[in-house]
Image (spheres, rainbow, N blue to C red):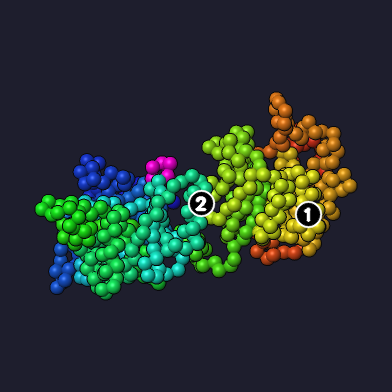
Amino acid sequence: MMDFTDARKLAFEYNSKNNPIKILSPEEKLELGITFPYEVWELETEIELTNNRQETILLYITFDFDFPLSFPKIYLSEEFYERSKYLPHVTNRNICVVDPDFSSANFEAPHITVKKCIELAKKILQDGLKGGNLKDFEDEFLSYWEHQYHNEEQLVRRSYSILNGPITGRNVGVVYYQDKFGLFSFFVHNYNDEYTQLKENLKNIGITAVDYPAFYLGTWQLEKPPFHIEYKQIIELTKSKGSDIFREFKKFINKSDFPKFLFFSRTIKDIEYLFGLVVGTLDTNRAGFQPNHLKHFDIMASFDSHKLAQRMLPVNIASKRLSMRTEGKIDEKEGFDVVIAGIGSVGSNLIHFLNSLKIDNYNLIDFDDLNIDNIGRHLLGFFSTGLNKALAMRDHILLRSPLQKISTRTSSIVNVVVKEPQLLNEADFIFIAIGKFNQESWINEQVKLGILKKPIFYLWVEPYLAGGHVLYVHPEDNRFMQYFDSNTMYKYNIISNESYEKQESLLKLQEAGCNTTYTPYSAESVISFLAAVFPSIKYTMHNSEKKSWCLSWIGDTEIVTKLGIQLSGIGLKNRPGQLLIY
C-alpha cells in the first residue's frame, strides 16, 4: 500500500496540473481558523454561474493523516460562503461531497479520489447557484434545522420524543428534568402509556420531573434556510391555520407558565418528524402601559415580534421508532415479560443479553445488597455498592432506557412464590440464577403442584467456571429431577462428584469472618458462558419451545486441573468452549 505522504504528493502533483494549488503553512492555516486537518490545500478554480458567466473562487481541501484511507473534505472560502449562503449540501462552509459512512475512498488511486471530490464540489455549487438542486433542501432539512445561524441561541439539546402514532388536536406536552450532572432533558409526549411509564420511572430513581403543556401547530412547510424563526412568523402560521386554532393559540400564549413549547410536524422521505420552538418569557410590564393592561400575546405580536424562538429537534425514542432505527423495520411481535430471580454475577450479566431482545417488562427479584467484593464480575459497579441488587439494576436499566417497564421485589424468590405467585404466572419466562439446589428443587415442586405455570430457565456455574449450565423446564415436560442423581448432584457436571465431596476447601474460598465463603470465577468466564448459551435461550423464547432441555458449557478446565481438582468424565472428554446439549 502507498505511503500516506506519497499519496498526498501524487494527488497534489496530478491535480495542480489543471488548477493553481498551494499547500498552506501552519501560520496560514491558523489565520484561516483551520487547525485540525493534517494538511490543507488552497485551490483556485472557476465555476459556471447563470447566463454562462464564470467566477473564480477559492476552495480549501483538507486531509486527515490517514488519507487516502479517508476522503478529503472541501470547504468554501469565508468570503464566498457569506455571499452565496445558503446552498444545498453546504453546511458551515463544508461542501458535503460524499457520505464517508456509506462510501469508501479508492486508496490505490488517491489522485483520482481528489479529482472526483473537486468535480463533485463544483457541481454542487453550480447547481445550487443556478437553483437546480433547491429541492435537495427537503432531504437535508434536519441538518439545516440544527444549524446555528448568526448569533441566535443554540438548539435545545437532549430533547426527545416519546410519541407513538400521530398527534391529534392539542394533546401534546413536555416533561423535563435536571439530572445529577445539572443537564436538562426534555421529553415530548402525547399523554400516552410511555409518558405514564416515564413519569413513574423517574420517580422511582429519585428524579423530580416537571410537566409543561405544549401547543401543536400542525404541519409547516418551511422551504429553505436560514431557519431562524421570529415570533411574528409563528403568529402568521397560526393565523393561516384558521380562526379556531388561532384563538386557541392566543389563549395558550396568554397563560402565565413559561417557557412556551410549540411543535410542528413535517414529512421527509416518508417519515414524519417533529420540530420544536421555544418561546421565552414575555414581559408584560412595559413603560407607558398600566399594569396588567398588556397580555403575553400582545408582547409577542409587537414588542418582541422580532425575537427568535429557540429551536428543538426531539429525537424519537419511542419503542416503534427505536425498532425501526436498529432493525430497519418495525417489530410488530409482542415483547416478553420476564422474571429474573437472583441479580448476582450471572443474573446481572444475563440482563445485558436480554436487553438485545424486545423486553416489555422486567420483574427483578433479589433480597441481597451489592458488596464491593461482587463488582469484579457483576454488571453493576462501584457506585451501586451498598444498594439492593434488584433496585440498583432497575436504576441501571432505566438510565439506559427510561421508558422500560420494571417491577422489583427485595425479598427471596421463595417469599415471592408464596405471597405473589401471580407475578411469576403473568410472565412469559422465569429465569432462576441463584445457584442453590434446595430452593431450585422447591421451585420445581411448585411447578409440579401447578402453583407455578410458566417455563423456567435455571442458570448456574461451577467453581472457577469450569462449567456453566442452563436447564430449561417447561411445565408440560417437567424433567427437572432427571438431570440430578440420587445425591442431588447434577449428572453433567464438569468437575467430578468426588472433588465436590472431598475437595471443598479448593472449590469454595473463604475470607476471614463468618458467612464469607464464595465461589471463585472471573467476569470474563461469565460473559463467555452467557454468550455461548444465549442463542439457545433466545431461540427457545422466540419459538415458545415446550420440550425441556439442558446445556452444559465447558469452561477453562486447565486452571482446575492445575489446582489438583479432578474433572468428571465429561470434563476430560471435551475441550474448553464446547457446548453440550442434553
Q: How many marks?
A: 2
Nearer the observer, 254 or 274: 254
The residue that label 1 is drawn on is 446
Q: Amino acid at mark 2?
A: Asn
Residue 44 is situated, as x and y percent measured from the top left of the image, at: 19, 56
Residue 81 appears in which quarter of the rendering? Answer: bottom left
Q: What is the three-letter code of the residue carrying label 1?
A: Gln
The kind of secondary structure the magenta stretch mainly shows is loop
The magenta stretch is 179-183
Question: Hey, which residue is sitting farthest right in the picture?
Answer: 486
Disc 1 packing (10 Å; few <14; some 14–19; many ≥20): some
Of callouts 2 and 1, which one flags the residue occurring earlier in the amino acid sequence?
2
Tell me residue 499's x, y (percent).
Answer: 83, 37
Check the image and name the residue furthest to the top: 512
Q: CA distance from mark 2 to mark 1?
A: 32 Å
Residue 59 in the figure: left or right of residue 495: left
Residue nearest the viewer, comparing 93 with 238: 238
Q: Which residue is mark 2?
A: 201
